Amino acid sequence: MFHHLSWWYKLFNKNFNGGHESILGGIVIHCLLIVFGGTGDLAHRKIYPAIYNLYVSGHLPERFAMVAIGRRDKTEEAFRGEAADAIRRYTRENRGTQEDINKIVSRFFYRRADFTEYDGYEELKEYMNILDDKFQTGGNRVFYLAVAPEHFGTIVSNLARCGLTSQENGFKRVVIEKPFGKDLRSAVELNNIITSVFREDQIYRIDHFLGKEMLQNIMVIRFANALFEPLWNNKYIDHIQITSSETVGVESRGGYYETAGAMRDMMQNHMLQLLMLTAMEAPVSLDTHAIRDEKVKVLKAIAPMDPVKASRNVVRGQYGEGIIYGRRVPAYRSEHRVSPESDTETYMAMKLEVENFRWAGVPFYLRTGKRMPAKTTKIVIQFLPLPGILYYKEFNKLEPNRLIIEIQPREGVIIRFNGKKPGTKSQIIPVELDFCQNCAVGEVSPDAYEKLLLDVMNGDSTLFTRWDEVEYSWKLMDGISEVWSRQKPAFPNYAAGTWGPAEADELLQRDGRRWFND
Ligand code: BG6
């Protein structure tokens, strides 16, 4: 059906990467990408725009094609039209042209298949061989599971049964979206299935936060600056706050969110990743294993959540109706596909202690929630006060020094310190040094999915979650779920458009602190 046509490449490869070092990292390897759930929300919002942006910026391998697998019957033409619409709608900036969109979607193919039926995999295998031949992808394949978690095991087992995971002819890698399980037990079960088919180095458990520019920058800020590293411990730091707040509600994802809640959707993965990067020791090298080894040690140093701690140090919330940006929005319980009596949390805050030499005595406060007044992800490091001898004695209202790492939407670093108010005799005011890396016009960082997709193609799993990170994160969360399962929450307990339930403020007030909402 297809032919090897060298002119075809010449015509279409204007923007493709022919195998040189990419500025996003690594040598780009030719491959076929197979997206299970290819007609779904994630594929349209994130994966296709990411492929397009990689193409426009010259990072996509020259010999590349993508097959979307979906349950619906549709022609290739219809699928390509939808993918092109999604790219136009969700691409991170107005880049490229209609011609570029047409070129990239001409590499997109569609196959209808039921994930649970084995026959479909046999057909798929033949189809992939044809595409391998046409695009000279050398048998290199990336299987991207952008489907509901209950399908992960079935798909992986069927791929193996059909011989699609053999590495004899080209590499085979699997990308698994979160949530990886819903508790430790289910995560272990899932992992057993996946590792019976793929080796750990073939498995890419995605946590898209790790692909964000500023998350990668945390290690650089910490370990490339004499200014910060010597102060990064319990001798100088009072406490650390990690916040990821969103103004959106659950949108069209009520069905999924009801089974997840803020704990499984954000805390177990994205928030703990932020914590690990903030608290880890310097790795011995920038090697994938060295970094992951240090990250997981942070989780190991957190004392398990016994029932007393889980009741005292963890707060959950659910939004009622309220006002966001001047617009009235409904309560969570009135959202589409959400039970009117739902006990699912849309907000979670907790206090953790990392019990090692660096951090003993320094609380980490983490919070995440939907329908909050602002979309922001940031890490606030608050330093201890100096001895109250000179200014502190006289000006006991001095603001503490703070270092703020802004992850999104603003990407930057702010240092807040005290200075003399010009022209006054002795008034001290907070001042700040502000570095913003995405404020200049036209500065848009690559989307996390671009970096992560490219890393999978390059075989670099540093920015993906290793099994033991998943394991320890669930151990921590399971202690909390156990306590929650025994107590019925008094939901809703915060109005949409506010910073969460009063108990979350009390969590810090008890320690003589407050959330940093500026
Ligand atoms: C996803 C969650 O992993 O992260 C969503 O499932 C959440 O509920 C999203 O909205 C937030 O990601 P970002 O990149 O928009 O901050």
Image: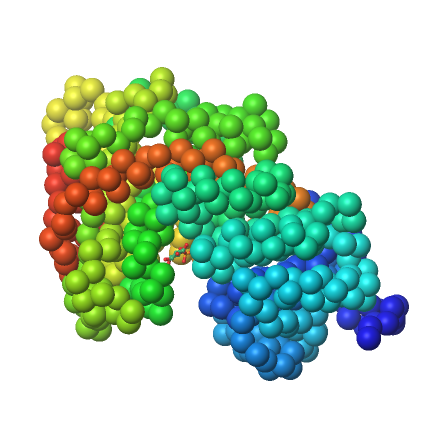
Q: How many marks?
A: 0
Residue 502 x/y as whole percent? 12, 48
Residue 112: image location, x then y, percent: 60, 72
Q: Quadrant of residue 321?
A: bottom left
Which of the pair 334/461 is nearer the observer? 334
**Residue at image location 65% in from the left, 52% down from the top:** 161
User: On screen, 424 above or below 47?
Assistant: above
Ligand number 1: quarter of image: bottom left
Residue lying at 33% horizontally and 68% vertically, measured from the top left: 251
Give how far across and how far down residue 376 sits, in percent: 34, 53
The answer to whether residue 11 is visible is yes
Rendered location of residue 189, percent (x, y)? 46, 42
* Nearer to me, 82 or 410: 82
Residue 171 vs 10, above or below: the answer is above
Residue situated in front as seen by the camera: 157 or 227: 157
Colour convention of the picture: rainbow
- The residue depicted at 32 percent of the width and 65 percent of the height is 254
Residue 487, image quadrant: top left
In the picture, measured across the screen, residue 11 lies left or right of residue 478, that is right
- In the rendered image, the quadrant that contains the N terminus is bottom right
